Amino acid sequence: MVGYLIRRIVQAIIVLFIVTVITLALVHLFPGGPIRAMLGPRATVAQVAYYNQLYGFDQPFYIQYLKWVGQILQGNFGFSAKLNISVASLIAQDLPKTIVLVALGTIVSLGFGIPLGMYQAVKRYTVGDYVLTGVSFLGYATPTFFVGLLLVEWFAVDTHVFPPFAPQSSSLLGVLSQPRALVLPVIAYAFVLYALWSRYMRSSVMDNLVQDYVRTARAKGAGERRILWGHIFRNSLLSIVTLLGLSLPTLVAGAIFIEVVFNYPGMGLAFYNAALNVDYQVLLGFTVLATVATILGNLLADISYAILDPRVRYS
Amino acid sequence: MSMSIPPSEGSLPAHVAEPEPAEPESAGALTSVEAEELGLAPAFKPRSLLRRGWEVFAQNKLALASLGLALFMIGFCFIGPLIYRTDQVHTNLQEVLCQPSASHLLGCDNVGYDVLGRLMLGGQTSIEVGVAAAIVSVLFGTIYGALAGFIGGPLDAFMMRLVDAGLSIPYITVLIMLSVIFHPNKGVMIFVIAVFYWLGVARLIRGETLTLRTREYVQAVKVIGGRNSRAIVRHIVPNAIGTIIVQGTFAVADSIIILAGLGFLGLGVQPPTTDWGSMLSGGLQYLQSSQSYWWLIYPAGIAIILICIAFNFIGDALRDAFETRLQRR
């Protein structure tokens, strides 16, 4: 187990190294370099040169990289020239709000996806299964932002049931104090994720239903309910745990679209605005943060999988 | 794995020469599949993998309907403009946001373009970029994954760590950065989408290759002294063709959604080119107004959903088709 852990952690560090190099290299791809892109075409050559020196872009790439990583390790993510605050404080301000959105959306989608996926597997090839499969396919095929647009059109513009915008407060408490405004963003976010969970749950439960341990449980006289929840549910959770860890890029992507559609003041919206304004320090900081989260997610998925399923450790 | 060591120069002629005299007698003892792999003429031509796949596919009514829908959408976008002629070059400020009517079946958008005609034009971009990005990703991912899986060892480990690294980046952040950097046209957009999509394909094909390389007929190529490239191109890839086609189908749907997402953010293909996502982006501003401009939202959104559902169903049916083939064997 310890060997397995060490191997996975070393791999994660290597991956992190590759990703940070790629991310920093991306910044140099801006036409004329990041400083020219940030200052705009009317800045003089001397100004560009001055800021290039100030931010260390005149130095070799590996020195830039080491300095940048060193600063990040000290919690310094750079400074947003456009917003006039440090990226770290921007993250501290916006990240909790995004986490609330992602967590609520994930919980709601799991709450529907797991039981309905199990229902589909047990009642497979019935009308109910086909209808729910149709819903999942719809979820797969519908872009996140279009779900958001439709919800706004139906429940805000046409019927005025919910406000069309997400809570517009800069603080986390302010956001939480407007639960009505959170409903549409969370539903839109959850709908797309629901498709993911329910389909995996359906196939996972169907795989498990024909396993020997289910037959054994039946032979010992266990009731269907006990077989389903005591045996199959627990085994199928394995794939959901892994999937959850692996789907962080999807969660991030969903968050960006939902935040743009509903103008939700989270990290996704801040990233989008930074991209439009070529605020490269914000772009770098957010990308690194999201990447670290993804790698940690993968690592946690692997570790929990190894804890839950001893067979993995020995492969 | 001593078999993976290529025969030395000296022993090579012996290996090559050996099977030749034995050929006529041993051919009868081989199964048709093995005979085919050895390059011998089989006694009868077995139905090809694609043909058997198609037979299963054709029994699936939903799949056939989806195929019909996809073909209809493609025809709508590429042949439609020849029948339903609209001016998609000059803006017409007199007809801004006009209601659907006999002259404009789906009304006009915020600069006076006919929405139905725009839907066809935008669909051309969506479909072209989606299909091209799918082809590029699947081609590159297949070559990369097959190479890594077949060669194995440290090179495989290194190549797969690169794929892991790529898959660990929340792709949307880099897609957005790339779009901002390049102000993409159609060609760049294909590259931007494929740059991430090939990773997943590579991982899948590598997994497939790992199982295929231990098969007898692949080992036989090595024993006979065939090159790695021959084993990959002639044996591994054809046997993984099911996975490759299924992935390609899903890739089309996913690429269209990614393109639409970037278009919606205003970062997709740049004007005057448009796609379904960019059309929705235009509709967002009018969503909050008192009057409902439904024709700015529903047509493009439904078009995206329809084509993605079609390609997803086709992919699913293809997977069933190829899996059934495996079970039957």
Image (cartoon, coloured by chain):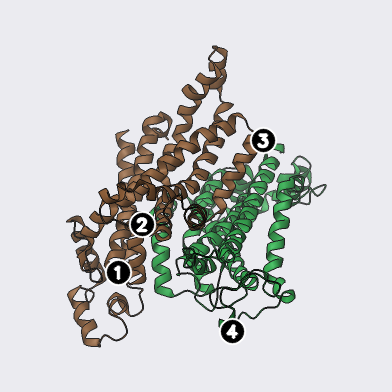
Chain colours: A brown, B green
Tag 4: amino acid: His
Marks 3 and 4 on same chain: no
Badge 1: how crowded within 10 Å, few (<14), some, or many (20+)? many
- Residue receiving disc 3: A127
Badge 4: how crowded within 10 Å, few (<14), some, or many (20+)? few
In the visual, does B85 lie left or right of B285?
Answer: right
In the visual, does A127 lie left or right of A20?
Answer: right
> Quick check: can you spot residue B129?
yes
- Residue receiving disc 4: B90
- Residue receiving disc 1: A280
**Mark 2 or 1, which is nearer the eye?**
2
Residue at 49% across, 35% down = A114
Circle 3 SS class? helix
Earlier sequence position, callout 2 versus callout 1: 2
In the visual, does A234 lie left or right of B7?
Answer: left
Where does the image place residue A164, in percent across and percent down from the top left?
A: 43, 56
Distance Cα–Cα, label 3 vs label 1: 52 Å
